Structures are given as structure tokens and as C-alpha cells.
Amino acid sequence: MDDFGVAEIVMANPPVNALPVAGWFALAAALDAAGADPAVRAVVLRAEGRGFNAGVDIKELQAATGYGALVGVNRGCAAAFSAVYDCPVPVIAAVHGFCLGGGIGLVGNADVIVAADDATFGLPEVDRGALGAATHLSRLVPQHKMRAMMYTSATATAAELHAFGSVLTVVPRDELRAAAFAVAHDIATKNPAVIRAAKESLNGIDPWDPKRSYRYEQGFTFELNLTGVADQVRDEFR
């Protein structure tokens, strides 16, 4: 935490920041801890490496026997996404490179998004035999754009999301961290009790509950795995 009361949480899991089961739960725990600290006034969530987040670790799922890893990663993702959403203070996501799958879940639940000009956003879930995070992509792009992206695995650029209004600002890659902290510091200068109340009130007026919506989506991922379709699609992808 810096002198302004801004906590920084950094994802760093080479080569592409695809998180295993333990990684999702660790991220959730870090976010929960930051929000529980009364001295924290805002959180910056960012990543090191080639991209922001490439979703779940498919290799971990493929190597597992039974459905333990699938249950674990689905619960881990739900915990991490919820930790962003439920964090008592605003979460500013600083996105560079690729933001895919689970990365969309994190960013879609963030309060503010700042992106590097090389950032791209997408849900390649259908190419992995899975579903999920359309809930969060719907918070980033219009409904029909989301459907087209979901069906085709197409990506959207930071510039497109900025035009939609979901990305606050787009900056050169080397200015991303500073831009995110500038927003966080602006928030941190406000009365912390008011900001925490504002976060809770804004969650309360959301048109739908993203946690419940995402868990509904996950049911179809379980169905695809139970019927063997997911394994077939993942094998073809590999």
C-alpha cells in the first residue's frame, strides 16, 4: 500500500498468466485482504508479463482425473470474480496485452478499467469446450457485440471498449501503471466512508447479480464436461 492508501495486486504467472486452481483462490484472498484493511482506499489490479490474464490453466484440467480440478477452477474463478465485485473499495484494473476468459471475469467486475493501447479482450471459451464470463463481457460491450464475440471467439480492442465507454482511458503500454494509479489516487483523496458507501450502493443498483448470473453459466460448462463434449473440443484445440 502506498502513501495514498492504494493497494497494488499484481498477477505474475508465466508464461501467459493462466491461473491454476490455487492461483484463483490466492487472488481472491489477496483482494479480500486488501478490502478488509480499513487503511486501503482503492486497489489497483494489474499483471506482469505478456498479457493481463489468459484465463484458467487448461493443462491443469487436462492432466486431472475426475472432476475435482474442474470444480476447483470454477469455484476459484467465482471466488476471484466475486472478490473484485465485493471489494469494499473501488478496484481499478490496468490491462495490457491479452485479457481472455477469466481475465474478462476480473475486468468486467472491476470498477474502473484503464488499458494499454495493445490490450485485447475476448472469450475463447467455445474453442475450449466451456462457457462462462459472458456475464462480465456484457458489462464491457453491447449485447449483440457480446453474442458475436462469444460465438466466434473474436476479440475487441482497447480502443473499441473505450468507444463503448467501458474502458476509461487508453494509454501507451509504458504509461499504464501510472495511469491506473492516477485514477486510484484521485479516488483516494475522497472521503473513504463515502467511497465505501458509494461502492456498496452501486453494487446494490446493478440491473442483475453478476455472481448469480456467472454461476448459472457455469452449469453449462459442467454439462459439457459431463457429456464428454468439453474433452473432445479441448483435445482438438491442443
Image (spheres, rainbow, N blue to C red):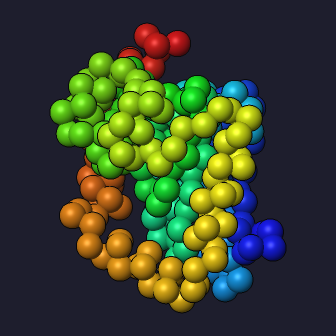
Please name the residue shown 45% across and 44% down the image.
167
**Image vertical order of residue 51 relative to residue 29, above or below:** above
Identify the residue at the far bottom of this view: 193
Query: How many numbered marks does the figure carry?
Result: 0
Residue 110: percent from left, percent from top: 48, 57
Out of 179 and 30, give the one closest to the viewer: 179
Q: Would you say 217 lies left or right of 115 here?
A: left
- Quadrant position of the N terminus in the picture: bottom right
Residue 88: percent from left, percent from top: 52, 77
**Image vertical order of residue 69 relative to residue 5, above or below:** above
Please name the residue shown 72% across and 49% down the image.
178
Q: Quick check: can you spot residue 64?
A: no
Identify the residue at the far left of this view: 144
Residue 108: percent from left, percent from top: 42, 50
Out of 19 and 185, give the one closest to the viewer: 185
Residue 135: percent from left, percent from top: 31, 48
Q: Quadrant of residue 14?
A: top right
Out of 120 and 190, give the one closest to the viewer: 190
Q: Would you say 194 lies left or right of 184 here?
A: left
**Image vertical order of residue 186 relative to residue 47, above or below:** below
Q: Would you say 173 lies left or right of 53 here?
A: right
Q: Quick check: can you spot residue 140?
A: yes
Please name the residue shown 71% across and 66% down the image.
7
Please name the residue shown 53% across and 68% down the image.
90
